[in-house]
Image (cartoon, rainbow, N blue to C red):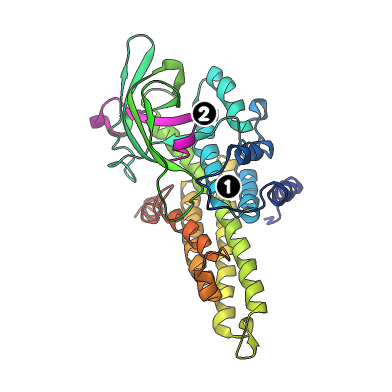
């Protein structure tokens, strides 16, 4: 059993770190969201098409390579809104198109998505269809001229307010449940697509998220992703990518956070001693390190299983659960270690906690992930 990353993966990690240092110097939460210039820079760095085939402008990396790159992105870029937006674009929009869309659609849209010319989004969540994604109310009907008409309302669409293209899901009949769901590629400039302004959020503030409404939006049959009724399979496959690879970014955040805490504990003095000399502080940092390394190993194992073509639902669920809950707890620990400074905005410690909190909600809540683990254990 080899725990070393390959030379290719180590070089990829270094390249992304260098890119972050040179082209993404810091976060500015005073801006409403990331800029198109930042987005295109991410495209030039290969971050928006990491796991897409090279023939479409992607990097051709597997799940482990994509996760390593995302870890470097989260480690080197303090703007987790941008990091999260790029990851959602790649794993929940680009990858379903790569794996299930028609060849003409792939040839037309993937180069634009991988290069950063376009921003992609995934639109599946609805008011009554969050964890229960089979309860979609958005309807799709055949138009009779080799097309489909979509009508419905989607919520919590990451990148939605600024996206050029959506991967969305609708049902032919709600009573059919999972068997009635079909996926589609929809450009946001099509008639019948309306988007809200970005939500005001607790964390990941530089990543715009909002609602999308479809009002008899007509798309050609060629824009269907997979076969009719295959939408749940398409979505679950994209969740495998997202739950594993996206969370590499939060491993990177925890790595950056740990370095900040070690440095602060070594420099800050109280009662004539460094903070790190107090067991209450040093043990808290030791626990942060334990969570980081355990989460990283589970993440890499899940990505390895995906790359091997193995059944990966259990390792992916365990990895996502471990990373998200570690990120929240370590965020709380970091604020405690910094004390009053950690509660202020300027050092950037409190934003790490705010950015970590939603990891226990998106891509499946911690409760749903535990349910998946229980089911995989035949409980």
Q: Position of residue 17 (x, y in %)?
A: 70, 51
Residue located at (34% from left, 55% from top): 379
Residue located at (48% from left, 39% from top): 159
Q: Is residue 311 visible?
A: no
Q: Secondary structure at mark 2?
A: helix
Residue farthest toward the front in the current orientation of the protein: 30
Q: Which residues are magenta?
A: 157-177
Residue farthest toward the left in the current orientation of the protein: 175
Instruction: Decide which of tag 2 and tag 1 comes sooner along the chain.
Output: 2
Q: Which mark is residue 303?
A: 1
Q: Secondary structure at mark 1?
A: helix
> In this view of the protein, which residue sits in the foreground, 343 or 253?
343
> In this view of the protein, which residue sits in the foreground, 153 or 297?
153
Residue 196 in which image quadrant: top left
Quick one: quadrant of the N terminus? bottom right
Q: Position of residue 28 (x, y in %)?
A: 57, 52
Q: Position of residue 71 (x, y in %)?
A: 62, 52
Rendered view: 64 above or below 164: below
Name the residue tied to disc 2. Answer: 97
> In the image, 103: left or right of 325?
right
> In the image, 57: left or right of 235?
right
Q: Residues within 10 Å of mark 2 (few under 14, many from 20)?
A: many
**Tags 2 and 1 touching, CB below 8 Å:** no
Q: Position of residue 44 (x, y in %)?
A: 68, 36
Residue located at (55% from left, 29% from top): 98
Tag count in the figure? 2
């Amino acid at each position: 059993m080899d725990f070393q990353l390959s030379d290719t993966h180590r070089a990829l990690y270094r390249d992304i770190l260098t890119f972050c240092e040179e082209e993404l110097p810091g976060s500015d939460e005073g801006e409403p969201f990331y800029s198109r210039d930042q987005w295109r820079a991410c495209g030039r760095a290969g971050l928006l098409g990491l796991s897409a085939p090279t023939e479409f402008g992607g990097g051709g990396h597997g799940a482990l390579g994509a996760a390593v790159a995302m870890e470097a992105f989260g480690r080197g870029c303090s703007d987790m809104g941008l990091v999260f937006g790029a990851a959602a674009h790649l794993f929940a929009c680009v990858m379903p198109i790569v794996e299930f869309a028609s060849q003409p659609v792939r040839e037309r849209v993937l180069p634009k998505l991988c290069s950063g010319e376009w921003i992609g989004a995934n639109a599946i969540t609805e008011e009554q269809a969050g964890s229960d994604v089979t309860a979609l109310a958005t309807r799709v009907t055949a138009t009779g001229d080799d097309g489909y008409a979509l009508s419905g309302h989607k919520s919590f669409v990451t990148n939605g307010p600024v996206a050029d293209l959506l991967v969305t899901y609708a049902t032919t009949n709600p009573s059919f449940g999972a068997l009635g769901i079909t996926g589609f590629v929809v450009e946001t400039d099509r008639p019948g697509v309306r988007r809200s302004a970005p939500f005001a959020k607790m964390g990941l503030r530089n990543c715009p998220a909002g609602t999308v409404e479809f009002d008899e939006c007509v798309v050609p049959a060629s824009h269907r992703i997979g076969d009719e009724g295959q939408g749940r399979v398409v979505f679950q496959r994209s969740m495998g990518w997202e739950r594993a690879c996206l969370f590499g970014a939060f491993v990177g955040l925890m790595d950056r956070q740990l370095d900040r805490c070690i440095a602060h504990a070594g420099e800050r003095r109280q009662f004539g001693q460094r903070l790190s000399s107090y067991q209450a502080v040093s043990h808290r940092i030791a626990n942060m390190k334990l969570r980081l390394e355990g989460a990283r190993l589970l993440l890499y194992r899940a990505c390895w299983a995906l790359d091997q073509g193995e059944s990966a639902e259990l390792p992916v669920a365990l990895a996502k659960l471990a990373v998200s809950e570690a990120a929240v707890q370590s965020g709380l620990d970091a604020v405690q270690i910094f004390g009053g400074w950690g509660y202020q905005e300027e050092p950037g410690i409190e934003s790490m906690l705010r950015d970590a909190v939603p990891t226990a909600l998106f891509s499946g809540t911690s409760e749903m992930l535990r349910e998946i683990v229980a089911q995989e254990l035949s409980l």
